[in-house]
Image (tube, coloured by chain):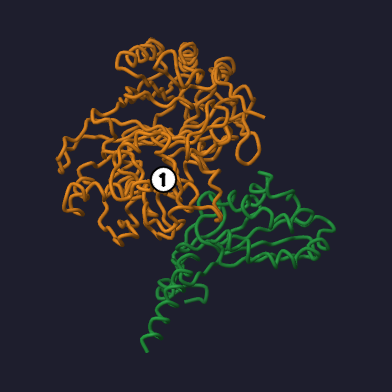
């Protein structure tokens, strides 16, 4: 039977891809008084954007509200419900730093975005297709907090598409994502079909059971988790690495493409291994239409250790212990900070990077599995300690190997460094209403 | 020095080990260990013995499919009242538990339902929880070549065979 998603009840960001271009803001609030927080939710509720009409929204802007476990505790959620959440959400991302590879330069002591352990109780996400629309939504957020003494805004981060139209390392971003059963339309070629319960609670997941949460169903139905990451990108180091490993501009493009598995245009190496083909990149019927195990088992076209073979191995792990269906992510990336001017290879000290909002119904077997086993480790693809050449930790290995022509790159720097992270709960609209009616000071 | 104290020389020989993330099991390098002890359903001993030959026969197929297990044992003990399952494998335990249970489910289902109390079928999400809840960590653990995974060993064997063939051909 076809799955029917309750789109009017699911917060919009679960299904909506960010607009292009996009203009957004993340607000972080600390709760000093539960009553103030409940008032905030009450005031925001009429403005929270559901996922209905997600593919053609009447207004190209939305506002969504999320909560850390600590935030829910402060709101007065009963202990038995709090204890029923997944352990990753209860502990918080900073506490899980060893497992997630957030050590050394990635250590939470370097984070400048608060997490659940030091102030992130409520996160408000605003995303819009124009600066004007963003400002309208931001004003709603400001008005909702106005006069609430028991709530403090402790952090704000603006995100927006750089003028280049690409993320800071120069790649076109956000090309591949799963098709969720019930979202409407048809999957594109190469797009995996995932059960809705992998991304929204209240629906069947890939284990054949209804994904559920703790407490009454009104609270968790149509909710999900967002695993939020703030990633600083060392663009100068990335450019120096390309420069030091290739003689010509074309050579540098090839090194970047080998590391990503796609040319910077987004064209997959699987379909055009020798040179970039921007026409393929632009064509949604072709830009994901490829496999690894069936068409390129040894990684001759797309290197086994590159970024896209790690975050989405497609069919590469068929016949192994890994059940790919259990580890799918819905990834929303948005850039922050100014572009490092073209050609500059020395760091200007300015913070720039990516905010990743990864939507998953089970943060343990989805985001955390991908981060710990695939991005930060290489054993699953016989690459030993080697990690993702773009996004991986560097304290264990600084190598990246390409089988054909055989080459081993050394001296990879920590191009991507964690500067914040938390598992957040994104209730459905019904869940927010339940919170207003049942939580707060007693 | 009493015989319970460890001399600095012997202490220096200790293999560095760590606990597995989020649960039971020790880890040395890339090698992990796990022991799971469950109760046996009354009458389960006979079922177990009826099924064990086929389970054993299929071990190679399923373990190869899993691809990360170095060795694996199942033991019925205490007069058919308890069951011990233990394994030495590559990598993390809890993160891969659901995958192993899902992917090798038909193999476990050959043996465990009606034997292991609480084990209905591998596809039941309660099964992974049951295994995690009944798992124990070894108090002492030693692993030879702890940085070599099954895949590494297979690769080295292929390499070694190729080198030998090359040397044979050269002579």
Q: Is residue B168 left or right of residue A225?
A: left
Residue at point 45% right, 63% down?
Answer: B29
Residue in the foreground of this view, choosing between A318 and A413:
A318
**Residue A151 placement, left or right of B99:** left
Residue A106 picture quarter? top left
Q: Secondary structure at mark 1?
A: helix
Task: Check the image and report above or below for B170 versus A71.
Answer: below
The image position of residue A276, as x and y in percent, is 28, 43
Report the residue at 48% width, 34% height from top.
A188
- Residue A83, compared with residue A144, is above or below; it is below
Label 1: which residue? A97
Q: Label 1 lies in what chain?
A: A
Task: Say which of B109 and A138 sits in front.
Answer: B109
Which residue is depicted at the point 31% across and 57% down?
A399
> How far across and down, in percent of the image, does residue A360 sit?
50, 35
Q: Residues within 10 Å of mark 1 (few under 14, many from 20)?
A: some
Please state the horizontal and vertical placement of residue B131, each as a whole percent of the image: 65, 52
The chain shown in orange is which?
Answer: A
């Amino acid at each position: 039977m076809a799955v029917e998603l309750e789109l009017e009840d699911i917060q919009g960001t679960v299904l909506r891809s960010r607009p292009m271009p996009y203009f957004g803001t993340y607000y972080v609030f600390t709760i000093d008084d539960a009553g103030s927080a409940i008032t905030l939710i009450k005031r925001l509720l009429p403005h929270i954007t559901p996922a209905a009409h997600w593919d053609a929204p009447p207004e190209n802007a939305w506002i969504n509200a999320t909560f850390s476990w600590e935030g829910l505790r402060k709101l007065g959620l009963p202990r038995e419900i709090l204890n029923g959440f997944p352990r990753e959400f209860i502990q918080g991302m900073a506490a899980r730093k060893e497992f997630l590879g957030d050590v050394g330069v990635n250590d939470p002591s370097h984070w400048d975005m608060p997490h659940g352990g030091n102030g992130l109780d409520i996160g408000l996400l605003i995303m819009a297709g124009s600066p004007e629309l963003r400002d309208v939504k931001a004003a709603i957020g400001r008005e909702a907090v106005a006069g609430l003494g028991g709530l403090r805004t402790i952090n704000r981060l603006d995100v927006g598409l750089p003028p280049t139209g690409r993320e800071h390392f120069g790649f076109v971003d956000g090309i591949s994502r799963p098709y969720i059963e019930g979202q409407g339309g048809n999957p594109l070629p190469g797009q995996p079909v995932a059960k809705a319960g992998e991304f929204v609670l209240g629906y069947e997941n890939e284990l054949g059971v209804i994904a559920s949460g703790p407490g009454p169903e009104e609270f968790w139905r149509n909710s999900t988790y967002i695993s939020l990451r703030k990633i600083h990108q060392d663009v100068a180091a990335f450019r120096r690495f390309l420069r030091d490993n290739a003689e010509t501009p074309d050579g540098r493009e090839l090194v970047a493409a080998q590391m990503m598995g796609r040319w910077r245009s987004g064209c997959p190496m699987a379909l055009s291994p020798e040179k970039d083909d921007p026409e393929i990149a632009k064509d949604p019927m072709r830009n994901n239409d490829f496999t690894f195990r069936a068409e390129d088992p040894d990684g001759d076209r797309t290197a086994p250790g590159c970024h896209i073979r790690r975050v989405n191995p497609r069919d590469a792990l068929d016949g192994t212990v890994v059940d790919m269906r259990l580890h799918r992510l819905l990834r929303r990336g948005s850039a922050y900070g100014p572009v490092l001017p073209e050609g500059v290879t020395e760091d200007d000290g300015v913070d720039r990077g990516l905010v990743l909002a990864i939507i998953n119904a089970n943060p343990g077997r989805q985001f955390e599995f991908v981060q710990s086993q695939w991005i930060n480790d290489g054993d699953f693809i016989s690459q030993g300690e080697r990690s993702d050449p773009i996004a991986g930790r560097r304290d264990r290995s600084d190598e990246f190997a390409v089988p054909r022509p055989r080459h081993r790159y050394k001296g990879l720097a920590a191009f991507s460094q964690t500067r914040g992270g938390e598992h957040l709960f994104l209730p459905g609209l019904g869940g927010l209403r339940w919170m207003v009616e049942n939580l707060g000071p007693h | 020095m009493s015989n319970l104290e460890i001399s600095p020389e012997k202490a220096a020989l200790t293999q560095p080990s760590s606990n597995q993330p989020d649960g039971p099991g020790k880890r040395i390098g890339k090698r992990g260990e796990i022991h799971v002890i469950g109760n046996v359903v009354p009458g389960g001993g006979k079922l177990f013995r009826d099924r064990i030959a086929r389970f054993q026969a299929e071990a190679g197929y399923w373990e190869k499919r899993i691809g990360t297990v170095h060795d694996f044992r199942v033991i019925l003990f205490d007069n058919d009242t308890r069951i011990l399952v233990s394994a030495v494998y590559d990598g993390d335990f809890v993160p891969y538990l659901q995958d192993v249970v899902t992917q090798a489910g038909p193999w476990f289902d050959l043996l465990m339902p009606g034997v292991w109390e609480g084990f209905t079928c591998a596809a039941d999400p309660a099964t992974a929880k049951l295994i995690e809840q009944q798992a124990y960590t070894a108090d002492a653990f030693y692993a030879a070549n702890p940085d070599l995974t099954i895949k590494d060993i297979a690769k080295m064997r292929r390499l070694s065979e190729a080198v030998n063939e090359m040397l044979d051909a050269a002579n």
